[in-house]
Image (cartoon, rainbow, N blue to C red):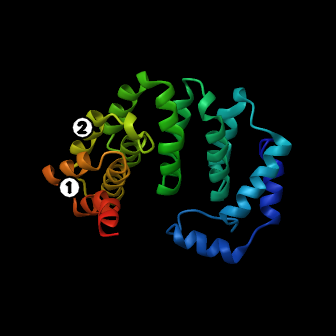
Amino acid sequence: MHSYIIPLSEVFNAKTNEDNAFFMKKYMKGQYDYFGIKSPERREIMRNFLQKQGLPDVQNLNKIAKEFWQLPQREYQYVILEVLGKMAKKAEKERIDLYEYLILNKSWWDTIDYIASNLVGIHFQKFPEQIQPYTERWMDSGNMWLQRTSLLFQLKYKKATDLELLTDYILRLQGSKEFFINKAIGWILREYSKTDAAWVMDFVKNNQLAPLSHREALKWLNRKING
């Protein structure tokens, strides 16, 4: 184990809660092991850890991040994502390749959604010339997590949302049977409806979306209309 991770590992092991771990693993469909440390306590542990250890050296970041990712307990992945989030605005251009690695490994919605909006989204704002080549390749990959990221990286863009790109990607994924794709289509439309309700209503009206996407897209607007 890398020396940077050892102090965190010692605390995590000391704070193990087997009852919590059982239910957390069950919630994630049994895919990952857990220490059983819930989010508020985990974030407090991380704050104390960073106060003592600081952020990782950029030169060793890829190695450290991948080691975090390979450890069995899911809390390690949550910590390194938040660490990367703190470093995202100062990331170098090549950081996108690390993000792609994280998307493709131990893939599930809990990490993908953070990576898409808090890492990739920020990165593409800094390096917009990477948007087309990366997201086009991701869309063509057939990998639903890369495709979900291509939809959700604009989740926090509001008025800066590239509607032409978003429309293209939604229509290309129209007809997908994947729950996580249809949910993402609805989610990005729902979020954008807070910026331009008329555009979203018009889009939903004029395109045959999956029932899940349609329902999710209008959820915020319906709640607002119905009070």
Amino acid type, label 2: Asp
In the depicted structure, whether residue 150 falls above or below residue 91: below
Q: Residues within 10 Å of mark 1 (few under 14, many from 20)?
A: many
In the depicted structure, whether residue 14 falls above or below residue 78: below
Q: Quadrant of the N terminus?
A: top right
The image position of residue 192, as x and y in percent, is 35, 47
Q: Quadrant of the C terminus?
A: bottom left
- Residue at the (48%, 44%) spot, across then down: 117
Question: Between residues 105 and 14, which one lies in front from this camera angle?
Answer: 14
Displayed quadrant of residue 86: top right
Q: With 73 as the anchor, is 110 left or right in this view? A: left
The image position of residue 101, as x and y in percent, is 52, 39
Please name the residue that numbered disc 2 is placed on. 168
The image position of residue 7, as x and y in percent, is 84, 50
Real-space Cα separation, disc 2 to disc 1, in angstroms: 13 Å
Q: Residues within 10 Å of mark 2 (few under 14, many from 20)?
A: few
Secondary structure under tag 2 reads helix
How many numbered markers are drawn? 2
- Residue at the (20%, 55%) spot, across then down: 209
Amino acid type, label 1: Leu
Please name the residue that numbered disc 1 is placed on. 209
Query: Residue 131, which numbered label?
Result: none
